[in-house]
Amino acid sequence: MTPTQGFQNEYGFPILPRMFLRLLALLLACSTAFSAPLRTKNVIFISTDGLRWQEVFRGAEEVLMTKENGGIAPAALNSVRKKYWRATPEERRAAILPFVWGEVAKRGQIFGNRDKGSDGHVTNSMNFSYPGYSEFLCGHADDARITSNDPIPNPNINVLEFLHGRPGFAGKVAAYNTWDVLSAILNRDRSGLPMWTQGDKSAPGVGGPVQRLVEEMLATHPWPWREESFDVFTFQAAKEYLTEKKPRVFYVNFGENDEWAHAGKYDNYLASIVNVDRFIRALWETAQSMPEYRDTTTLILTTDHGRGAGLESWKSHGKTIPESREWWTAAMGPDTPALGERENVEPVVQAQIAATIAKFVGEDFRAAVPEAAEAIGDYFQK
């Protein structure tokens, strides 16, 4: 009898024995298990509040570079145009985000350019900050309970909290926050995360000299918003923490983009984008200068929501502005194929960020939070 005699269907094709099929499945599972391990040991995750995909992928918008639509003083119009206006979208976006386009997009990937068939969007229905932050930190929307920006402790487990409780991560996951509501979104009291938020006053002996100086300056320097300070303060404190404490997973959030847009000041909005790009570069280059991070760190960038696309609606976002669900993300690191600006691809969603962060450091967030969205697969080598 031949090996397949007695195991054929009516058409003469072999039917493999069940034991053989089980062995085949085991071999396939083993081949997956023994695939090359990830080289990423650390993640730097940075979000910048309310940065539209339009500026990220098209650069400055000419129709908003006016007094009427962008709140720019007539005396400043020429200098603003000189700084930010270029002939092509590629040149304009590089003028405000030189590091993102010169390094991150070139060496990694960036999603969200709807002009090129790359859709990114939020899955919550609110299209504003707390629901957005909660979605990308917790891996899913919660439209039933997260319905405002009130600083109510988040009932959902976030990925930083999850990692903080995993072996090898205790005390090695941290967050530095420009917006004070992040303390509630990350549920400071429950999570026990090492965290600094503008307005905090560190206990004696806690925090380095830069952080203490920042706290002193924040206590005496007026800023135009009640819940948020200028990004530069958070950047300086975060950079010190990165160099001194060397966290494995470090989240930094910036917020000026959203505040200047709400104020209708397009020139300040653009300037704040330039600053965020500069801060991202500085944090990345600082990490790469240290042996603990060099060539073993992945950088992930995103925003919490988009904005309107009209002459007035660009200033705002929310349920009544459908374009504000439009979202973008970027990443680069040792495990992310350098596919650049993604075109004509399947949509990605904000909720995928949580599992993506965990996967880069070898952890399965969805095992703890099954409702969380899966990681962004294209960010990982196949």
Image: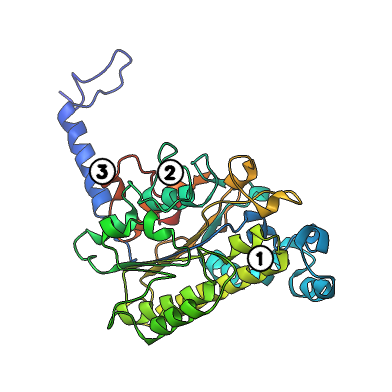
Q: Quick check: 312 above or below 18? A: below
Label 3, on which residue?
28
- Looking at the picture, how far across and down is residue 25, in whole percent? 23, 38
**Closer to the camera, 329 or 154?**
154
- Looking at the picture, how far across and down is residue 173, in whole percent? 30, 66
Task: Give the residue drawn at x 39%, y 49%.
Answer: 375
Query: Are circles 2 and 1 on residues that touch, CB within 8 Å?
Result: no
**Closer to the camera: disc 3 or disc 2?**
2
Question: Which residue type carries mark 3?
Answer: Leu
Q: Quick check: 11 above or below 299? A: above
Count neighbours of disc 2 (C-alpha within 10 A) and say few if under 14, some if 14 to 19, many if 20 or more.
many
Task: Give the residue drawn at x 57%, y 68%.
Answer: 100
- Looking at the picture, how far across and down is residue 327, in whole percent? 56, 50
Label 2, on which residue?
146
Circle 3 SS class: helix
Q: CA distance from mark 3 to mark 2?
A: 42 Å
